[in-house]
Image (tube, rainbow, N blue to C red):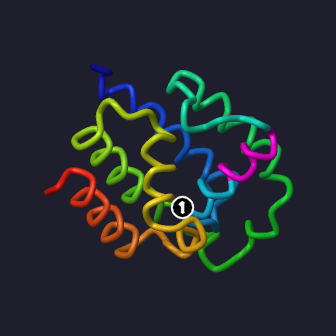
Amino acid sequence: MRDPNRLDEIYEHIKERHKTLHPSRGIMGLLKDMTQWAVYNKIDLFYLEDDKVIETFDKYSDERGKDFEFNIGPRNSHPERLDMPYQYLCSIHKSNFPDWRFFQLMINFMDDYGKNCVSFLDDGDYLYDSFNAFIKKVTNG
């Protein structure tokens, strides 16, 4: 069994980079873009071990952070809005899917929810409701 506490560092690191380099983007829009970047760069995120997530996210973030016009916008001045959603995602990951790798959870969720729709999930109630429905479906709860 994987140590669920390993996830704290991953979520915290991604959240801080998100707040700094991509402050106006939603969580799932950012992660969807990263999965597309990874496909283009021939990186299989689904099987990426957790010890490589931060390194890979930093490569993505450094490369894509310069490219986005999305970094300007009404949410840009409130990056602290990301604190609760990241805390929530880390918590559900640790409690419901502790053995799943970081991107294993995110990609399974995107596949289940629909990759075309996932970027419309902002950092509020729809995100929580969608993940709660995903948890119920996957855990038969």
Give above or below for 83 relative to 12: below
Give above or below for 138 relative to 43: below
Q: Which residue is mark 1?
A: 28
Locate residue 126: give its quadrant: bottom left
Q: Residue at x 73, y 66 (%)?
A: 71
* Residue 66 drawn at (x, y percent): 85, 53
| Quadrant of the image containing the N terminus | top left
The residue most toward the bottom is: 74
Q: Is residue 14 left or right of residue 44?
A: left
* Residue 5 drawn at (x, y percent): 32, 27
Task: Tell me where the magenta segment starts and ends, as one range.
Answer: 34-41
Q: Residue at x 29, y 33 (%)?
A: 98
Q: Is residue 66 left or right of residue 13?
A: right
Specify few, some or many for label 1: CA neighbours under 10 Å numbering under 14, 14-19, or 20 or more. Answer: many
The residue most toward the right is: 67
- Count of labels in the image: 1
Q: Is residue 77 left or right of residue 49?
A: right
Q: Residue at x 25, y 60 (%)?
A: 137
The residue most toward the left is: 141
